[in-house]
Amino acid sequence: MSTQHKELRVGQFENAKRAMYLAKELLLNNESIDVTSGTNGAPVVSRACETLVRLKYVTITDIRTETNVVDGSRRMNFVMQLTKTTDFLKLYDENETFRKQKQEEREKASVIPK
């Protein structure tokens, strides 16, 4: 069995909420993932991963930086490895149910009777 993890690459202009959503979607089919970014995206990765930990979706199993030399210049990558908790699926399903209820409420509120 391979120890390679799926990777979520977060750009500097992404927001933490979107990164959290994408991380949860990847974790549905994987036990762990690597969330990576360059130097400018590191605060977004950190914020998203720490929020997922606080909400008890994941645990952080590794935090590291990687430096690669590309065409004579150094490129830094920030990597946080996340592993889902035993309650991940239960929390995910509860959140999806709540999200669908809110979406239905918004749709009903947007329909204006004549």
Image (cartoon, helix red, strand yellow):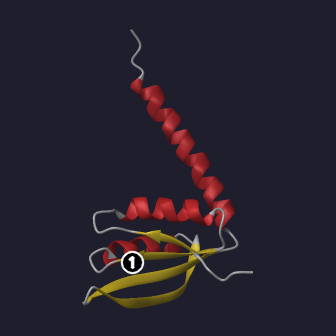
Residue at horizontal 37%, vertical 83%? 77
Q: Quadrant of residue 112?
A: top left
* Foreground residue among 43 and 107: 43
Question: Disc count in the image?
Answer: 1
> Compared to 73, does 95 lie above or below?
above
Residue at horizontal 60%, vertical 66%? 27
User: Dividing the image into 4 quarters, which one contains the C terminus?
Assistant: top left
Which residue is denoted by mark 1 in the rendering?
46
* Foreground residue among 114 and 37: 37
Q: Position of residue 21 (x, y in %)?
A: 48, 59
Image position of 28 (left or right of 106)? right
User: Dividing the image into 4 quarters, which one contains the N terminus?
Assistant: bottom right
**Dot 1: few (<14), some (14–19), or many (≥20) neighbours within 10 Å?**
some
Image position of 34 (left or right of 68)? right
* Foreground residue among 101 and 4: 4
Residue at horizontal 32%, vertical 86%? 76
Q: Position of residue 110 (x, y in %)?
A: 40, 26
Q: Position of residue 93 (x, y in %)?
A: 65, 54
> Compared to 105, does 72 lie above or below?
below
* Secondary structure state at the residue bearing disc 1: helix
Q: Residue furthest right?
A: 1
Q: Position of residue 53 (x, y in %)?
A: 52, 75
Q: Quadrant of residue 72?
A: bottom left
Type of amino acid at the residue the image marks with label 1: Ser
* Foreground residue among 6 and 25: 6
Q: Residue furthest front?
A: 71
Q: Quadrant of residue 82?
A: bottom right
> Compared to 17, does 3 lie above or below?
below
